[in-house]
Structure formats: C-alpha cells, structure tokens
Image (tube, helix red, strand yellow):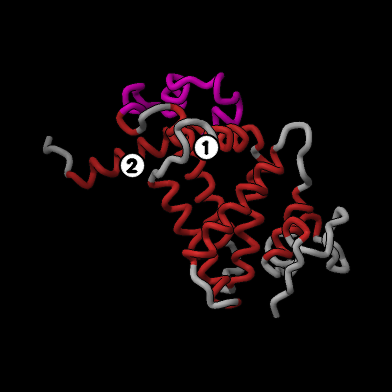
Amino acid sequence: MSPRSASVNEELRRRSRERLLQATVELVGERGYDATTLGDIADRAGSARGLISYYFPGKRQLLQSAVHRLMHRTLEAALEREPRTEDGRERLARAIDAVLGLAAERPLLMRTHMAGILQAEGFVQCPEQQRLAALLRDTVARYGAETRGSGPDTDYPLLRALLMGAVFAVLLPGAPMPVARLRAELFQRYGLDWELGSPPNGGPPDGTPPDGAPPGGVNGVLVERRE
C-alpha cells in the first residue's frame, strides 16, 4: 500500500480537529466546563486522548477555539441564508441577531466561554477566532461603506466590544437583560430598522423598540438615524 499523500494527511488532521471542536461544544453545553474532561471530549470525538494535546495547549484553549468555530459557523449561516444580500445594513442586523441568538440559545456554553476570556489565559488567537474576526470585519466594512465611509480598523473593535457587552448582559446570573431590549439598543446605535435581520416575534408593529427601550442609542446616547 502506497503511503498517503501530504494533502490526504492534512485533510485527516483537519477532520480530527473538527471532531474535537464539535465534541467540546456539545459536552460543555450539556455538562458545563468542570464536569467535562479531556477524556470525555476525546471519547465523544472518537479520537485518541493524546491528539488533544497535539492540537491545543489545554482545555481552556480548546473551548475557546470550539466556541469561536461555533460562532463563525452560526454567523456565516446567518449572513448567507436566503434571500442572500450584499446590503450592509441587513448583514449587520443578521450578525447582531446571530450573536445574541447564540447567547440566548446556549447560555451555559457561552457563559463558560466569556468567563474563560476574563481569566489569566486571556483571549486565544486561534484560526477559528481569526475566521470569525474576518467575517465580522467584512460585515462592518460593508455597513460602514454604505453609511459613513469609515474603515473596519475603527469600526470592528467597537462592534466586537458592543457585542461582547451585550452577550454578558444576556448571560448575567440573577439579572439578565432581555434580548429584545439589547437588540433595540444595538439597532439604534447603528441606525438599523427593527424589521431587518430576524426580529423576535415579528417585532413591534409601529417600529418602537420593545420593553420600554429609551429613544436614544446605547447607554441612552441619542443616535441619529442614518438615511
């Protein structure tokens, strides 16, 4: 039998890594971080335990990469769903809805992920995070090109910070903020119409932000609607 080519080996490694990432989001989402061992992840993925150490420095880095992969795939699906569009406002609305939706639908997983970012290991610059960042940068670049002519170097870090803050607010134990209220704040911040993206329950019929949201943008700062 002839040896496998380099391209075949690379594809096998990619699939093995993907299985580990998928198993991680499944198990941590079901059991939590502390109750999930690296052995559990390897078993779920059908991989050898030693492969995890080959690909990742530790469990925290593995989790961050796994969640970034999930976020990238979720965001990509939202941006490319039918009807497909190149409209910057619609794509930004879809991006906001996708991130807020993940926080609402997978609270244990996302809470664990956000807590890990605040710990000593900090933010992991992995391939999955870089793909997620590139997609968000492209989204905010399309939006900025249609509204202000500004660039992603300025707009992307702000969008990332606002989305992370909104996710924290959704997940805050004991005092979570309603997703619809946070969505209204972000949409006002960026001058987006409520019916863009995937409005919850069809959105308010008169276009007024729900849950008593103030007429201003984030933190009550008035944001002029961009026409």
Q: Nearer the viewer, residue 135 or 185?
A: 185
Amino acid type assigned to the residue bearing label 2 in the image: Arg
Q: Would residue 208 be found to the left or right of residue 224 on screen?
A: right
Count residues near mark 2 (Cα–Cα under 10 Å), then give few for <14, some for 14-19, many for 20+: few
**Main SS of the magenta segment?**
helix
Indicate the amino acid at tag 1. Answer: Ile
Q: Can residue 1 be seen by looking at this rendering?
A: yes
Residue pictured at 73% horizontal, 73% vertical = 224
Q: Residue at x 67, y 66 (%)?
A: 190
Residue at disc 2, secondary structure:
helix
Residue 150: image x %, image y %? 53, 73
Q: Residue furthest bottom?
A: 227
Residue 1, percent across and down? 12, 35
- Residue placed most toward the observer, 140 or 37: 140
Distance between the alpha carbons at the discs numbered 1 and 2: 25 Å
Q: Where does residue 216 sit, x and y in percent of width and height?
A: 79, 64
- Where are the magenta residues, as a range? 25-53
Image: 210 above or below 18: below
Residue to which mark 2 is pinned: 14
The label number, if any, that marks residue 74 in the structure image: none
